[in-house]
Image (tube, rainbow, N blue to C red):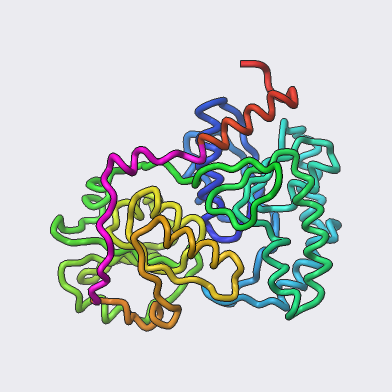
Amino acid sequence: MTSHGFGHATRACAVIEAMHESFPCRFSIFSSLPDWFWTNNLNNIHHELYDAKTDVGLIQKDPFTHDLEKTLVHLLKFLSFDDENFHYCLAVLRAQKPVAIMCDISPLGLKIGDILEIPTILIENFTWDWIYEFYEKELSQFSDVRKSLLTIFRSAELRIQAIPFCEKVTLAEVVDPIHRKLGSTKEEVRERLGIPEEHSITLVTTGGIVEKYEFVKKLEQVKGQTFILTGNYSSIQRSSNILELPIRNSFNFQDLVRSSDLVVGKVGYGTAVECWAGGTSLLPVYREHFRESAKMRAFVLENLSNREISMNEFLSGNWIGKNLDLSPPLSEISLNNRKKGSLQVANLVISFLHRQSSLPAS
């Protein structure tokens, strides 16, 4: 499982949950994300956790910028597939002999599946070869990296592309946006957080990457709103109309999004799709030097009530207190009629495993 933010891991949790409901099974999860994330999201599903680096992604300087040279150094080491991390994962999977290896944009499992002759499944809305192609003009060594990864990603025996995906791949299966089921109602979340009924709620997020917000004083001047800030806080703190939530907290992200009237901040797959599922308005901030951003922007413009703000607008707080003139939210009936990509993935995977004779006939 890629550790490229929490969005892909949240997507994986939705798929695991849907698969478990359709065909209960055990999951071994290889990831460098903290154990608490998986425990909180999969507390009723049998799973084992293995701390492992499953891809490199982009080495971040902060939530909005990355370091290409450092990324390349890490990539060249990772793609040798000859370090302690790789041999650890290989040994565990050789001993376990799983019925399949399922990857969310991570190449490591695909490589090991090829070596051990285990069926492989790839879930993606982009792949790293497509992302790195964008940087070849800046650093030519990305060309060799891209070619190596392209071969690995093409090796997946079942490839599933989740809307909004970035580049259509021939013969890949396409599913609707993958989002999580609600754990708590809006009313329950509001009550647990102690938010007055008459207050609207704005959730501020940087996609799981810690950021210090410099605009807090401006938020305190806004009447009739409660602002939920997620970040590197030691505990839940309340000050005036501001709630500071640590990254590790007892609330599911999808519940916070769908309880909010507005989400503001960095947008990746997880945030965009949870806003889509909940009909929550969005003030998106895109990374201009990240290739996925153009595709994500197109999805948001077509499907969400939104108004784009720049990184500088976000960081300075120039969006605070303005009349945003956003379209009204969709009705609950319209939202409930939206298809669930997680169930579609579960059906595709289970059918694939039956064809592979990896599961008994149901």
**Depth check, front residue: 238 or 350:** 350
Q: Residue at x 65, y 39 (%)?
A: 28
Q: Is 90 left or right of 344, judged from the image as shown? A: right
Q: Quadrant of residue 263?
A: bottom left
**Depth check, front residue: 330 or 109:** 330
Q: Determine if residue 40 is in view.
A: no
Q: Position of residue 132 (x, y in %)?
A: 71, 67
Q: Is 192 left or right of 251, judged from the image as shown? A: left
User: Range of the magenta residues?
Assistant: 322-342
The C terminus, quarter of image: top right
Q: Quadrant of residue 73?
A: bottom right
Q: Is 186 left or right of 86, judged from the image as shown? A: left
Q: Determine if residue 82 is in view.
A: yes
Q: Is residue 276 above or below residue 27?
A: below
Mainly helix, strand or loop, the magenta region?
loop
Q: Quadrant of residue 350?
A: top right
**Depth check, front residue: 135 or 258:** 135
Q: Position of residue 77 (x, y in %)?
A: 81, 66
